[in-house]
Image (cartoon, rainbow, N blue to C red):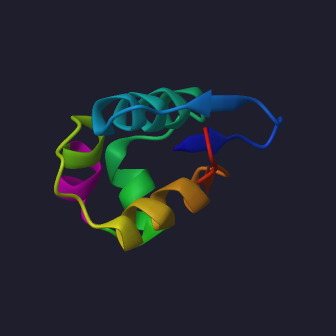
Amino acid sequence: MVVVNPNGNISVMHDVESLGLAVKKKRKADGLTQQELAAIAMVGVRFISDLENGKPTVQLRSVIRVLKALGLELVVMDK
């Protein structure tokens, strides 16, 4: 799994924990609280917390909403 930010920087994610850390880092870099990001992405604050903490059962649809709200893309590609 690859996450691409608006600057074209690419981060390869090997697990849910690294995806959560990338989301948290981008949220903080954008100066957003979990509450603000949740409102923008139309998800619950609990979801943002679960995602940032690497909960393995988060819903993909909601993950994509959060990534979109942060200006990130999820890319799946062959190794």
Decide: is 64 above or below 70. Answer: below
Would you say 64 lies left or right of 38 here? Answer: right
Residue at image point 59% right, 61% down: 68
Magenta span includes 45 = yes
For the residue pair 48 and 34, the one nearer the viewer reads as 48
What is the magenta segment's predominant secondary structure?
helix
For the residue pair 50 and 9, the one nearer the viewer reads as 9
Residue at image point 34% right, 45% down: 34
Q: Residue 21 falls in which quadrant of the image?
A: top left
The percent position of residue 13, horizontal first and vertical second, equals: 47, 33
Residue at image point 67% right, 52% down: 71
The percent position of residue 53, horizontal first and vertical second, equals: 21, 34
Would you say 45 lies left or right of 36 here? Answer: left
The percent position of residue 56, horizontal first and vertical second, equals: 18, 48
Decide: is 26 above or below 47. Answer: above
Seen from this angle, which residue lies furthest front? 79
The percent position of residue 33, horizontal first and vertical second, equals: 39, 41
Would you say 37 lies left or right of 5 here? Answer: left
Would you say 43 lies left or right of 53 here? Answer: right
The C terminus, quarter of image? top right
Span colored in magenta: 44-49
For the residue pair 54 and 14, the one nearer the viewer reads as 14
